[in-house]
Image (cartoon, coloured by chain):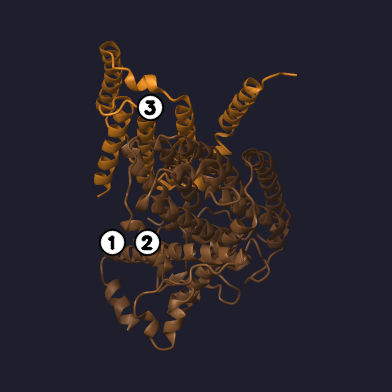
Amino acid sequence: MFQTIFNTISSWSPLTQFTFWSAIKVFGVFGVAMTIVAYAVLAERKISAFIQDRVGPNRVSLPLIGSIPFLGPLLTRWGIWQPLADGVKSFIKEDFTPSYVRKAYYWLAPAITFVPALVVIAVIPFGSYIGNQKMVIADLDVGILYSFGIISLGVYGIVLAGYASNSKYPFLGGIRSSAQLISYEIAMGMSVVPIFLVTQQLNLSAIVEYQAQYGWFALPFCARELTPLSFMIWPFALISFFIFLVSGFAETNRLPFDLPESETELVAGYNTEYSSIKFALFFMGEYANIIAGAGMMVTLFLGGWSVPGLSDAAIAKTHIAVGVAHILIFLFKVFFLIAIVIWVRWMFPRFRYDQLMDLGWRRFIPVALANILIVAVIVWAVTTFSNETKPALAHSAYQVNK
Amino acid sequence: MHDAFFYIFAILTVFCAVMVVANPVSRSPITSAMFLVLTITCMAALFVQLHAFFLAAVQILVYAGAVMVLFLFVIMLLDLKEEERRRIKAVSAGLGTLAVGSILFLIIKSTLQFGQAGAIPPHTEGSTASLGKLLFSNYVLPFEILSLLLLVAMVGVILLSKKDLK
């Protein structure tokens, strides 16, 4: 059946095919991402309840669900319907606009916070292939630079929210966040340079393929073709991963770095004056950012969709089941990282602002710079002194195919 | 379709750039800064159409994402109420129009005189790898001098911001 559908589709013109597949991918990814956002909130509440020895949400359920035989009692427990109830609540709550706010920016800010996270997800390869379709919405040649560019635009939402609210605490939150995000973007950007020195690519799909072949950067143990290089750069890749992970916390304003909204000092920081769905957009933006960050980390350090024994993209082209499995593997890794992010929030106290700046500028940036230097020397030594040519992926395959 | 995109983004770029300096609705410096961000983003879109993806990404990353955030940061801290109240003076508006008009005249004149540029070169120049190779071979001296200049500026800032010199 699939074959006939594919055949019909492949008889269309290339532009129609491209539009068709892109539309499917966009809607699919958006739907899945928004579902994960909703359930990440539930996961956050459940995990925090577990850590604090509480029960967490366990009551909400739709009418009549409980009377479904066998499944019913399961579906009414664990608060599975809580995200739905929260969503409806934010929509029907009164949307109060204080009289003193700057209206245009007040309306724009929540959207500007929310959109960049979704746009970053567009370049993350969430699977290998299904049929001949690459499982990434936009396979950009400068993938990683693009995502850093978009992430850096995310700060405008928070800064403008602080400015638009026109009152003290949001303003302080906005100022804090702009300084924090700029500082950690530098560390974050530098931490991934070693990856590109090794792979010689900026394209995220190519980086995943490299890891599928030569071992994940964070865990180079099982791959199709292990090289000494994989192990020589392993400690440095781990340093990169650590810096990227911690900067990710700072970039998403998560505890221990949630200074822009630290409730003990700033009420709720930049979103103090927001209510109803506008507040919910900030809230969902935070989780969408976590998902985008987790997706980036999986792609850059944890081998994306690849897993030992199932790391060949070529098989996925002919077997749809393998392609689907790759997507599920990617999602599983993302869930794992999201769980870590949530766990950290409830385990560590908040940093002081000067400690945050000290960590970013005086620890991470020098370490990241040294890391780049050492990896560059290793790569140079390996390419110069070993007989085999450097494992460079087929460059031509990833050049702009126009 | 390619042409249509060019005209859309070109018009948007010019429109946003005009709004930076001559916004009829708001005189707020924050609004000007935000329109500058939009101008930069539209210019990045124009770079994309020239297949200079690296330039486009860096344009957004550096200018829209870092430099303009710092601008915004400073404007917000300065709290420029005076700027919002100030009217546009006829003399300065006239002088500005004159300056922009003469530049426009020069551009149009030279375009008409020399015609369009020759065949558009192949698109590979914009790729990251080839740009990097050029920077570290043909243009290594200007590149290094520029980085030295930035270093000097950085040292200067640190020196100026230190309260007591030992």
Residue furthest bottom in the image? A69
Location of mark 1 (residue): A15
Q: Nearer the viewer, residue B6 or B20?
A: B20
State the CA–CA distance, disc 3 to disc 1. Answer: 43 Å
Eye-nearest disc, 2 or 1: 2
Q: Residue B112 at what x, y percent from top left?
A: 24, 26
**In terms of sequence position, does the residue under pointer 2 or pointer 1 come before the other?**
1
Q: Colour of chain B?
A: orange
Which residue is at 64% across, 51% downward? A349
Q: Is residue A73 left or right of residue B97?
A: right
Location of mark 3 (residue): B29
Q: Nearer the viewer, residue B7 or A268?
A: A268
Which residue is at 72% across, 18% downward? B165
Q: Quadrant of residue A284?
A: bottom left
Q: Is residue B45 left or right of residue A192?
A: left
State the CA–CA distance, disc 3 to disc 2. Answer: 36 Å
Could you classify mark 3 by the number of other residues whose Cα lies within 10 Å: few (under 14), some (14-19), or many (20 or more)? many
Residue furthest right in the image? B166
State the CA–CA distance, disc 2 to disc 1. Answer: 37 Å
Question: Mark on residue B157?
Answer: none
Eye-nearest disc, 3 or 1: 3
Location of mark 2 (residue): A87
Same chain for the residues under marks 2 and 1 in the image: yes
Could you classify mark 1 by the number of other residues whose Cα lies within 10 Å: few (under 14), some (14-19), or many (20 or more)? few
Given the image, on which type of amino acid does mark 2 rest? Gly
Proximity of marks 3 and 1: CB atoms separated by less than 8 Å: no
Dot 3 lies on which element? Answer: helix
Q: Colour of chain A?
A: brown
Q: Nearer the viewer, residue A374 or A369?
A: A369
